[in-house]
Each structure stands twice: as structure tokens, then as C-alpha cells.
Image (cartoon, grey):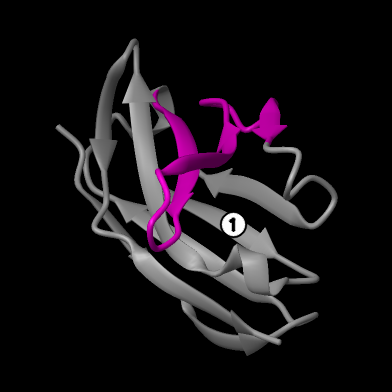
Amino acid sequence: QVQLVESGGGLVQAGGSLRLSCAASGRTFSSYTMGWFRQAPGKEREFVARVSWGGHTTLYADSVKGRFTISRDNAKNTVYLQMNSLKPEDTAFYYCNADLLGVGYWGQGTQVTVSS
């Protein structure tokens, strides 16, 4: 089992940057595909980005491509989401996800608010 704790959220002006972190427990962190999802008020949770177990393969939602970068440090059991050029529409609760062969775990999330 994996426990995930997100941090790094906050309030930022449009055009600014934030870096989210997700610290994972467990010795098998490096086996998991790690991802970030977000949920805005009144909307469904949506995919943002994911990174393969070795960190070599990434995938992004079209809405964040070119602005967000996902990375991981397996030695620190941590995955990051660097968010640049933030827009008000990026405002949401951001959740970290760990997935191994379809078995997934979620963190409790961190709030990101982008003011215009």
C-alpha cells in the first residue's frame, strides 16, 4: 500500500508559478506510475499529467502542455508538478495518484488558486 501527501499549493497571480510535491510512503514507489489530477468546483476530476516508473515517459493534458512539467525522484519517493504561466482556469484541488497495474492510490489533495 502507498500513502501520498501533497504539498505546495497556494494562491498565486495569473502568470505565476507553483511547484507541487507529493511524498509517498512505501519501498515500492519506483514501481508505480505517478500522476496528477485536479478537480475544480462543480466539475469532475480530470487528468493533468503522469510519469512512468523510471521517469523517462511523460504525458500531459492538452490544457497544460508546455506550461506544466511532471518529474519524480525515486530516491526521495517524491513526484513533482512544476506549474508555470498559471491561468485562473488552473484553479482546482490537485491530487497525486499512484498506479500499479490498475490499482490506484490517492492523496488528500492540495488547493491551487490562481487570481486574475
Element carrying mark 1: strand
Depicted 21 relative to depicted 35: above or below:
below
The structure residue drawn at horizontal position 71% and vertical position 77%, both measured from the top left corner, is: 17
Task: Give how far across and how far down residue 33 sits, in percent.
Answer: 46, 27
Q: Quadrant of the C terminus?
A: bottom right
Q: Which residue extends farthest front? A: 42
Instruction: Specify few, some or many for label 1: CA neighbours under 10 Å numbering under 14, 14-19, or 20 or more.
Output: many
Question: Visible in this render: residue 24?
Answer: yes
Q: Which residue is mark 1?
A: 81
Q: Is residue 82 left or right of residue 84?
A: left
Q: Quadrant of the N terminus?
A: top left
Task: Give how far across and how far down residue 105 sits, in percent.
Answer: 24, 35
Residue 90: name its quadrant. Answer: bottom right
Q: Is residue 70 left or right of residue 32?
A: right
Q: Is residue 95 left or right of residue 61?
A: left
Residue 106: name its quadrant. Answer: top left
| 46, 36: nearer the viewer | 46
Task: Give how far across and how far down residue 61 sits, in percent.
Answer: 68, 38
Q: Amino acid at mark 1?
A: Leu
Say if the magenta span includes residue 114: no
Say if the magenta span includes residue 58: yes
The structure residue drawn at horizontal position 24% and vertical position 58%, both measured from the top left corner, is: 108
Q: Which residue extends farthest left? A: 1
Q: Which residues are magenta?
A: 32-60
The structure residue drawn at horizontal position 64% and vertical position 65%, both measured from the top left corner, is: 89
Q: Which residue extends farthest top? A: 101
The structure residue drawn at horizontal position 39% and vertical position 48%, both measured from the top left corner, is: 96
Depicted 13 relative to depicted 45: above or below:
below
Task: Give how far across and how far down residue 13 sits, in percent.
Answer: 69, 89
Q: Is residue 112 left or right of residue 89?
A: left
